[in-house]
Amino acid sequence: MEEIKLKARAKINLTLDVVGKRENGYHELEMIMQTVGLYDEITIKRIAEDEIRLYANVAWLPTDERNLAWRAANLMRQTYGIKGGFCISIDKRIPVAAGLAGGSADCAAVLVGINQLCKLGLSRRKLEELALTMGTDIPYCVRRGTVLAKGLGEELTNISPACPICHVVLAKLPVGVSTAKVYQTLQWDKVEYHPDTKAMLKAIAQQDVDKIGQLLANVLEDVTIPMVPKIAEIKQAFLEHGAVGTLMSGSGPTVFALFTEKETAKKAAKMIRQKFAMKDVFVTKIYHVSREKHERRKQYDRHKI
């Protein structure tokens, strides 16, 4: 196998809580993360030349060592003595700097892809350990699914059953938000309303989409919404157009909303595009990793026949 294609999927935070701060300044987190259907497509090819070539359909995206996907390929080459190099193409569909972990997902896909392409036989745990050297949310992007994350975000526990499948609308405002600035500004010990993580876990276990929607919570909204007030306006508009719940993802500026009916989700997305003159609005759904494994198995069986 000389080429492989993968889907690097976006994530949302069903809950995001800051429960402490370490002496080094890093925040202790507790959050429930969820993969959604929106994805970047990553193509990795082996080449004879001893170099990494990275291409993207977004002209201004860095294609050198500043890009996490490039760094992931370089890490795999150096760590495992891989001869030759790689040509990596990124077809970006996840908005950049959106709180959806698009760059981290691309990085994770390259780790997973090179492991398969070069037949390294690395376990998921080992890939997660490698991922952690490049960023605290990249191990989750290797694992994906419905996951409780603690520590700096790298202590991962699978949640089973997974979040019930429902429809998700993502709306990314055309503004930039510095994650570092948001965390620096947050006074975590003065936050009045923290997510009820236990109640959210119970709602997921009961597969109660309405309750999940009611329990969506993100303490970083306390910082980002005053910086970008339209986030609150978009949330209110979603609720007025049938969403069972809505929340800012990560440090923003993307707002997501959950819907039980696809047509309601599509109508809400259209409304958001028009009312707020937004381009980056996507209708997708909760994504289950088990479904992808099932599809791969079906493809394998068809080829075997």
Image (cartoon, rainbow, N blue to C red):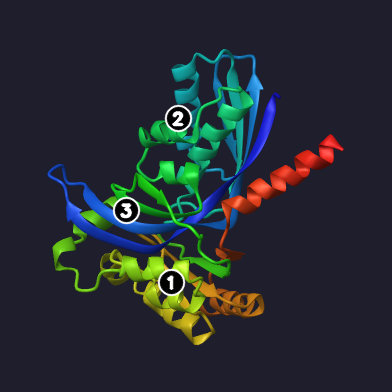
List x then y, in percent, for residue 88: 60, 32
> Residue extending furthest right?
305
- The answer to whether residue 207 is seen in the rendering is yes
Q: Tag 2 or tag 1, which sits nearer the N-term?
A: 2
Relative vertical location of residue 271 with respect to residue 105 in this rendering, above or below: below
Which residue is more in the foreground, 71 or 82? 82
Relative vertical location of residue 149 with respect to residue 200 in this rendering, above or below: above
Query: Tag 1's secondary structure?
Result: helix
Return the residue at label 1. Answer: 203
Q: Residues within 10 Å of mark 3 (few under 14, many from 20)?
A: some
Return the residue at label 2. Answer: 71
Q: Residues within 10 Å of mark 1 (few under 14, many from 20)?
A: many
Return the residue at label 3. Answer: 179
- Residue 296, label in figure: none
**Residue type (three-letter) at the residue carrying disc 1:** Ala
Along the horizontal axis of the image, is 61 left or right of 150? right
Q: Tag 3 or tag 1, which sits nearer the N-term?
A: 3
Mark 1–mark 2 distance (CA, rounded to whole Å) = 38 Å
Mark 1–mark 3 distance (CA, rounded to whole Å) = 29 Å
Q: Tag 3 or tag 2, which sits nearer the N-term?
A: 2
Mark 2–mark 3 distance (CA, rounded to whole Å) = 21 Å
Query: Tag 3's secondary structure?
Result: helix
**Residue type (three-letter) at the residue carrying disc 3:** Thr
Q: Which residue corresponds to the image point at 17% horizontal and 51% vertical from the top-left? A: 21
Relative vertical location of residue 162 with respect to residue 259 in this rendering, above or below: above
List x then y, in percent, for residue 23: 12, 44
Relative vertical location of residue 249 with respect to residue 296 in this rendering, above or below: below
Could you tell me how many numbered marks the image carries? 3
